[in-house]
Image (cartoon, rainbow, N blue to C red):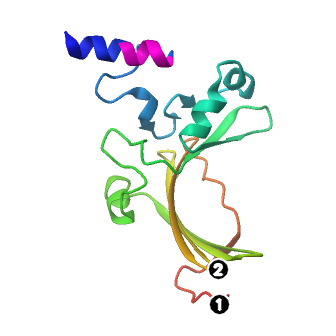
């Protein structure tokens, strides 16, 4: 009884629907090609604003890329709170991601800025609608960042920066 009461309290407090899965709340679930938590591909920017989604997005390190018609076309997170039903999250290794998504193809990029440069390896399973990115920024300090992006199935994830040969030695 205590379990159901606490599950009900979570759903009531956050105002999310009973689609939440008690124990693994749906608002932390990554569904490739469909959604990241409570943000769904195709969801209107207007609906997101009306439902107070911006606070949810900011507090959970979620970025939504909207298309020409103000609909969500990509959803990215830097937060380890989000995981697939198989447990894949941003702290997963690239090898574990590839094991679960063997059709993933690698794209390497570099982008240069005032404070240094960033190299990225993007593992994109286009058919499933999910990509995993490892990025390393080199400037005054070296910082590694992982992210997961949900995108439309059969549409490659957006790539920013110059595409480079993955075996190429990066020269600052």
Does residue 13 sit above or below 139 in this rendering?
Answer: above
Q: Given this view, does label 2 or label 1 mark the residue nearer the observer?
A: 2
Where is 47 relative to 77, above or below?
above
| 10 magenta-colored | yes
| Alpha carbons under labels 2 and 1: distance apart | 12 Å
Residue 76 image label: none
Q: Of residues 3 and 33, which is closer to you in this image?
A: 3
Q: Earlier in the sequence, mark 2 or mark 1?
A: 2
Magenta stretch bounds? 9-14
Residue 6: say if magenta: no
The answer to which image quadrant residue 1 occupies is: top left
Which residue is disc 2 drawn over? Answer: 139
Q: Residue at x 44, y 12 (%)?
A: 12
* Residue 6 horizontal/vertical position (percent): 30, 16
Query: In the shown orientation, is residue 76 left or right of residue 100?
Result: right
The percent coordinates of residue 26 (x first, y second) are 41, 27
Tell me if residue 17 can be seen.
Answer: no
Residue topped by disc 1: 171
Up-down relation of residue 96 to residue 78 (above or below): below
Indicate left or right for 1 with 51 as reference. left
**How far across and down, in percent of the image, does residue 164 sit?**
63, 78
> Residue 19 at x, y = what percent?
41, 17
Secondary structure of residue under mark 2: loop
* Residue at left offset 61%, top offset 53%: 157
Looking at the rendering, which quadrant does residue 72 occupy? top right
């Amino acid at each position: 009884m205590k379990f159901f009461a606490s599950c009900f309290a979570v759903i009531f407090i956050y105002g999310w629907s009973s689609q939440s899965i008690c124990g693994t709340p749906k608002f932390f679930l990554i569904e490739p090609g469909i959604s990241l938590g409570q943000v769904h591909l195709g969801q209107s920017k207007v609906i997101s604003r009306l439902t107070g989604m911006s606070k949810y997005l900011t507090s959970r390190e979620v970025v939504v890329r909207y298309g020409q018609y103000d609909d969500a076309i990509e959803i990215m997170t830097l937060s380890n709170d989000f995981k697939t039903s198989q447990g894949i999250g941003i702290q997963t290794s690239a090898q574990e991601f590839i094991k679960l998504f063997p059709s993933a193809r690698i794209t390497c990029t570099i982008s240069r800025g005032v404070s240094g440069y960033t190299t990225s390896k993007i593992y994109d399973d286009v058919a499933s609608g999910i990509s995993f990115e490892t990025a390393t920024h080199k400037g005054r300090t070296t910082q590694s960042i992982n992210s997961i992006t949900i995108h439309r199935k059969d549409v490659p994830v957006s790539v920013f920066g110059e595409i480079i040969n993955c075996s190429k030695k990066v020269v600052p």
